[in-house]
Amino acid sequence: MEKNQSKKLKEVASVFFKLGCFAFGGPAAHIAMMEDEIVTKRQWMTRDYFLDLIGTTNLIPGPNSTEMTMHCGHERAGKLGLFVAGLSFIIPATLITAILAYLYVSYGTLPEVEPFIFGIKPAVLAIIASAVIKLGKKAIKGTELAMLGSLVLMASLLGLNEIIALLTAGILGMLYFTIKEKTNKNIHSISPLFLWPVLGTSLVKVSTLNVFWVFLKVGAILYGSGYVLFAYLDAELVTRGWLTRAELIDAIAVGQFTPGPILSTSTFIGYQLSGFYGALAATAGIFLPSFLFVLILNPFIPKMQKSKVLRHFLNAVNVAAVAIMLAVLVIMTKETLLDWKAIVIALGAVILTFKTKISPIWVILIGAVLGYILLGLFS
């Protein structure tokens, strides 16, 4: 039994370390790559259950894709698998970011990576599109859910906050389908699972402890995708005078062109503020709440699936989550396909993704190389 558990933990560590090294493109792309590894290739769970995890994860604070790794690790190897998966996904980005932070502090510049990022962005679009199609087929279980998803898509494209969209869709779906079934069962109210404290204090100097508390607070209240992080950091760091806005923009750039969770930006900023121990404190602070939230939430998911009323809620949230992924894809496409070079790379990625069985990791690597070559030849 112990040998089997050890084997599962090694498998979990291997899968998510690999994803941590190559998962570029933000939360939607991370989840798309995860779906390919966990559901399609390894069949650790059904696509329906994977969808339920996406839906519930979107409703709690923290980086969604990182929390998804923890759920998947728990499914494969229990509570220890949760921690192994999360750490394996976080560590590669953290190490890469820490090295870049050292170089930035020492030399004041960042490596020239724009040609590679130019190629990665259009390649990621095909990977996200593939996941949206596969997950959408499972999420859309009828005309009503298709209509609900369409409404969420339109609302998201118009700028509605994704958490409001998810919760509204979940409640409307739950009410509609419950009334439709004409059930007379009593629906018990559900107490909140979490009450997170406000940890803010008046910070006078940038000590390691102060860095930890600020990033712990951000990690505990950060909703939605990692990109929302930047607004929090501007309020917490720039307005306090800890960083200039130019330094924050450089930190944001690092988070965008390194693989894995975009919250690895915290490692870069922590190093800027308080050296090596500041990097450790910021990283630990921002990710710790996610481990706790997933650890608390995970046991409730099977119970939610068994409840008829909450099953309706999950179905509606799931189709809303796929709609939001589609909205992200539409926005990214408009921002990325701005010239013929990006379009060529995107078309190549579509062919590789939909017409071959090549791994999404290779699609990203090929896109990066094409970006380097095309910008080198035609810039």
Image (spheres, grey):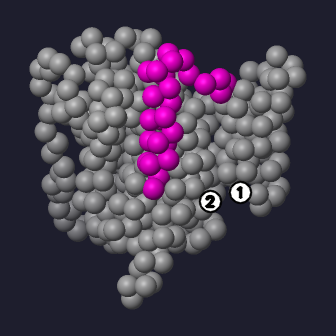
- Verify whether residue 99 appears in magenta: yes
Q: Which residues are magenta?
A: 88-114
Q: Find residue 126 and report its horizontal and vertical position in percent.
A: 71, 44
What residue do we see at 45% from left, 56% from top? 88
Q: Are marks 1 and 2 in contact (CB under 8 Å)?
A: yes
What residue do we see at 74% from left, 47% from top? 363
The residue nearer to you, when weighing 254 against 160, is: 254
The quadrant where residue 215 appears: top left
Disc 2, SS: helix
Is residue 34 something one can see in this rendering?
A: yes
Query: Which quadrant is home to the C terminus?
Result: top right
* Cα–Cα gap, marks 1 and 2: 8 Å
Q: Is residue 103 left or right of residue 352?
A: left
Q: Amino acid at mark 2?
A: Asp
Query: Which quadrant is home to the N terminus?
Result: bottom left
The residue nearer to you, when weighing 107 against 324, is: 107
Residue identified by numbered label 2: 36
Q: Find residue 186 and report its horizontal and vertical position in percent.
A: 19, 65
Q: Find residue 348 and report its horizontal and vertical position in percent.
A: 83, 42
Q: Is residue 116 left or right of residue 379?
A: left
Q: Amino acid at mark 1?
A: Ser
Residue identified by numbered label 1: 359
- Verify whether residue 244 appears in magenta: no
- Foreground mark, 1 or 2? 1
What residue do we see at 32% from left, 39% from top? 280
What residue do we see at 65% from left, 27% from top? 113
The quadrant where residue 335 appears: top right
**Mark 1 crowdedness (10 Å alpha carbons): few <14, some 14-19, many ≥20:** some
